[in-house]
Amino acid sequence: MRIWSLHPEYLDTRGLLALWRETLLARKVLENKTKGYNNHPQLARFRKSEFPIDAINFYLAIVYEEAVKRNYHFDSGKPGRIGKKVIIPVTVGQILYERNHLLSKLKLRDPEKFIVLQKIKYPEPHPLFIITGGDAEVWEKIKVESLKVF
């Protein structure tokens, strides 16, 4: 499961579809509606939030907006209600790590998106996140190919 800190505009089709499915699953985990993935480290930042369900619903709403921009047909009822505005910190190191991780995927899957993202040194985060100083998150399983500088 990868819930990207990057804005979903950088994802290719495969990545955006996977993000949608995985974030819907993550919400079920946060709502205690499934037994799997309960200890998934990427859910820690949502759990630390004062309003985890509002946070994940906002996250889903932005993913849905990106899908609409691309003329995809995601279920408009899935993002859920957003009661409270939530902002979650994400480190610059995490953003840069994810940029490189995504670049390693795009190089194989979508060369056009690879070229576009390669030119962006500091990509925008998903609007749920605000960038702070620091390295990649401690829960991140660092992959060697994602340390490569593109």
Image (cartoon, rainbow, N blue to C red):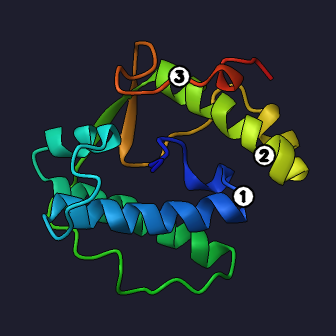
Mark 3 or 2 closer to N-term?
2
Residue at mark 2? 106
Left or right, 103 with reference to 81: right
- Report the amino acid beneath label 1: Asp
Q: SS for tag 2? A: helix
Above or below, 52 against 119 in this view is: below
The x and y percentages for residue 7 are 55, 48
Residue lying at 89% horizontally and 51% vertically, measured from the top left: 112
Above or below, 32 against 150 in this view is: below
- Report the amino acid beneath label 3: Ile
Above or below, 119 against 132 in this view is: below
- Report the amino acid beneath label 2: Leu
Query: Toward which corner of the image does residue 8 lie, by quadrant?
Result: bottom right
Residue lying at 66% horizontally and 25% vertically, measured from the top left: 146
Query: Toward which corner of the image does residue 28 lie, by quadrant?
Result: bottom left
Label number found at residue 1: none
Q: Tell me whether the residue at label 2 lies in contact with that at label 1, contact meaning CB atoms closer than 8 angstroms.
A: yes
Classify 10 Å Cα crowding around label 1: few (below 14), some (14-19), many (20 and above): some
User: Which quarter of the rendering shows the C terminus?
Assistant: top right
Left or right, 67 with reference to 59: right
Q: SS for tag 3? A: loop
Q: SS for tag 1? A: loop
The x and y percentages for residue 5 are 47, 41
Residue lying at 29% horizontally and 58% vertically, measured from the top left: 56
Classify 10 Å Cα crowding around label 3: few (below 14), some (14-19), many (20 and above): some
Q: Which of marks 1 and 3 is in front?
A: 3
Across the whole image, how many numbered discs are drawn on residues? 3
Residue at mark 1? 12
* Extreme residue in the top direction: 134
Label number found at residue 142: 3
Residue lying at 31% horizontally and 37% vertically, measured from the top left: 41
